[in-house]
Image: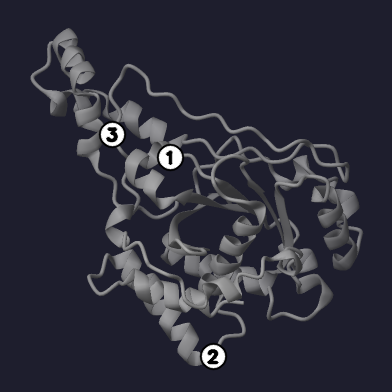
Amino acid sequence: MASLRPPVSRLTFIRGAPDLRSSQRRWAQVHDVRFLATHSEPNRVIDKYRDKLDRKVKEEGLKDVDELKEVYKEKIQSLRRTASIAPTASTSPFSAPPPPPKQSEPEPESEPKTTAETTSAPEPSKPLPSIKPLSAILNLPKALLLPPTEISYLWRLRHASNPNSLSATIPSETYAIIASTAQKHPHFILPLPRPGRGAEIHFLQWTFPTPNTSTVLFTHLAEYKLRGEYAQPHTTVTHHLDMSEEKGIVLLQGNVVEGRGVSVEEGKWLLMCLQKFYGSVGLDAGEKERRRRLLEMFSEGHGDFRVEELVEEAEKIT
């Protein structure tokens, strides 16, 4: 992170972060979408597929859509648990990175689906098969023989050829603070400056699929409001904790999906904002309290949460 000085603790993407400060100073306007947008609207989905649902109700000999949802309750829950996460890099140890991974959009089936609620806590006990462990990316026994500085260098080198990739090494102590905050506040929104057009709001979701990994998905808030659980993230980030205890570092890898309205530099900006809000490293007591309060109000759906206040706080991030 920007505030940490030892070589291994410096996040590799910070040096390449865009100089957005000048364009941030006073954004022209704020699109006040607020926290209400993070709650899905099941009626949108039901209205959209009303004819199909009615036909299905008749085919099944049921009373109404509510009874149909109850019949397919287990299938809906299963689909939610197995919602796709972007694939990570290939398995060749210390080799050159593969092309940017492709993400496939889940296609609606004939059975009815409801829009996912986004307020539940992450489920560490539910591993997602699409996330590769670090052992499938690096030769861990060999890598663990190296000092942290060399591991950090090799990790950066491995992702250097992929123009859409994000990579970093984070000190274990710093990651522990971030993860602890993420467990309490797995959902949040962050503003992205758009010079001359105000601030564009993005929705982030934390998951903890295995004991040694955590993921963050960034999605346009407008798309998340419209499509709920079927909204496609534009940026995905995975943290690997396999070396945390022995080497004192956490390896971060991410990917910005081309053609989804966010550049790699903007993806880096959002990731830096996330670290500043969730990590609070190097901040004075007043800054920590303001950011903690914003996280708490958003998680609680508090009526005093204001996007304008969030934007003002984000303006201070360099």
Q: Which residue is mark 3?
A: 114
Q: Quadrant of the C terminus?
A: bottom right
Do labels 3 and 1 touch, CB within 8 Å? no
Q: Is residue 212 visible?
A: no
Name the spot of residue 183 as percent of width and height, x first.
46, 63
As drawn, the label of residue 284 is 2
| Residue 248 visible in the picture | yes
Question: In the displayed structure, does residue 295 sit left or right of residue 243?
Answer: left
Q: Is residue 35 above or below residue 223?
A: below
**Residue 65, position in %: x, y?**
15, 25
Which residue is drawn at the image coordinates 23% and 17% (left, top)? 52
Instruction: Write down the residue under mark 1.
Output: 231
Label 3 or label 2, whichever comes before in sequence order? 3
Q: Secondary structure at mark 3?
A: loop
**Element type at mark 2:** loop
Tell me the residue at 26%/33% (across/down): 45
Q: Is residue 275 above or below residue 237?
A: below
Q: Which quadrant would residue 185 be assigned to in this image?
A: bottom left
Q: Position of residue 151 (x, y in %)?
A: 86, 59
